[in-house]
Image (cartoon, rainbow, N blue to C red):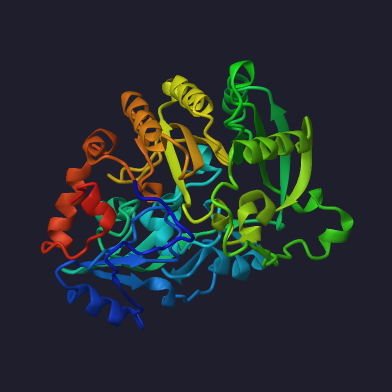
Amino acid sequence: MQTVLTGWGRTAPSAADLVTPAGTAAVDRLVTQAGRRGIIARGLARSYGDAAQNAGGTVLDATSLDGIGTVDRTTHTVSVEAGVSLDALMRRLVPQGYFVPVTPGTRYVTVGGALAADIHGKNHHLEGSFANHLESFTLRAPKETVVAEPGTETDVFWTTAGALGLTGVVTDVTIRMLPIESSLMLIDTERVPNLDVLMERMVEGDARYRYSVAWIDCLRSGRSLGRSVLTRGDHAPLEALPPRRRSDPLRFAPPTGLAAPPWAPTGLMNRVTVRAFNEFWFRRAPRRRLEHLETITSFFHPLDAVQGWNRLYGRRGFVQYQFVVPEDAAPTVRRSLERLSAARCASFLAVLKRFGPGNPGPLSFPAPGWTLALDIPAYVRGLGDLLDELDRLVVEAGGRVYLAKDSRLSPELIPAMYPDLDRLRELRARLDPSGVLQSDLARRLQLL
């Protein structure tokens, strides 16, 4: 089992050459001249596994492609280079009245990485994933350069969404931004006693809330299995702000935050500490509180307030595991939580969300139904067997595991989880007939 160690982006045992291009011409040269082990692009290295690793080959550091254009206020679009982070984009555009259309749990991912993973957020049930909000992008592949739009070069567009860099290097993207009136969120929060009630509440609120997410206490069992804190809301309109904020409603200056210690005891995240944290987190939430204000950062990116928070798991690190199962496979979520609880698996972060319709990309993760994401300390006894069992439950339910977070999935399960891989291979035969675009993940899971 491969695990995340003391930070994101750790190279594989046989290190790759990390190169930083100076402009798009350099990207073309690096892609066409890659060696036998090929090349893969990397953004800010927030993938939890080996999607942006290439042992013995080349990794292209795309963060130097960091230009941001001017917003077209008629179409609400902005063109940016693919190495721009969501953090930089938000710092530039939130004060101008625009928010990113989709954000994961951290701002520190690049636009190119967001497309490569076809990231999802708390609004997928209504607004889909990142690729749904793109006007176009430029893809530089070994054989040709393509400007892809949803209506032209359709196969390139949708196959690249979620393909984890295996169709080419994205150099620029045009995004439809979300107009907002303030940098605050109007939120409803409530404690939920168990999983059944939680799922009922989430289904009932699908159409009423743009954003919806539930934190779950994975150590509970019996009648309180899946007790949760459910948080839902939308961007606060100007009239919802207190008078003191209306003079500067779009103020946005996320704090840098405290730094986690460079080391932490391996056993810091154990059943005792996580149980105590879970009890605190559940009790601190209001039983029910309607329409209270939160900042964008506290609602979307709470862990960004602690620099290097992943180090709290110690040198052995943690495994991030996320799956989606269809709407009618809700019992699989219950069985998964029962397995985790029975194993006394101390997942500090367990999040349940709803997904709406998925995209046609053969490696795009979201599909209609339920998605559960877990952070689990890597030293948990029997963790490999437990996750293998969860994999089988997911496959039996017609679901899949998120490859951008994977580090240990068996390749034998890939055809059942992602049955349209031949479309990716067909496009690569056109764009990359020599197999230049490679990664450790692609080799491990036999994707190509």
Residue drawn 16% across the image and 50% down it = 425
* The furthest residue to the right: 243
Q: Give the side of residue 378 with respect to residue 397, left or right.
A: right
Q: Give the side of residue 408 with respect to residue 125, left or right.
A: left
Instruction: Tell me, yes or no, if residue 80 can be seen here.
Output: yes
Query: In the picture, residue 51 is in which quadrant?
Result: bottom left
Residue drawn 83% across the image and 64% down it = 247
Residue drawn 34% across the image and 61% down it = 52
Instruction: Tell me, yes or no, if residue 154 can be seen here.
Output: no
Query: In the picture, residue 88 is in which quadrant?
Result: bottom right
Q: Is residue 165 above or below residue 201?
A: below
Residue drawn 63% across the image and 33% down it = 208
Instruction: Between residue 100 and residue 366, name the one nearer to us.
Output: 366
Instruction: Between residue 242 and residue 434, name the one nearer to us.
Output: 434
Instruction: Between residue 92 and residue 438, name the one nearer to us.
Output: 438
* The furthest residue to the top: 223
Q: Give the side of residue 42 with respect to residue 95, left or right.
A: left
- Percent x, y of residue 333: 47, 26
- Percent x, y of residue 198: 61, 25
- Percent x, y of residue 129: 45, 47
- Percent x, y of residue 428: 17, 57
Q: How many marks?
A: 0
Instruction: Between residue 421 and residue 133, name the one nearer to us.
Output: 421
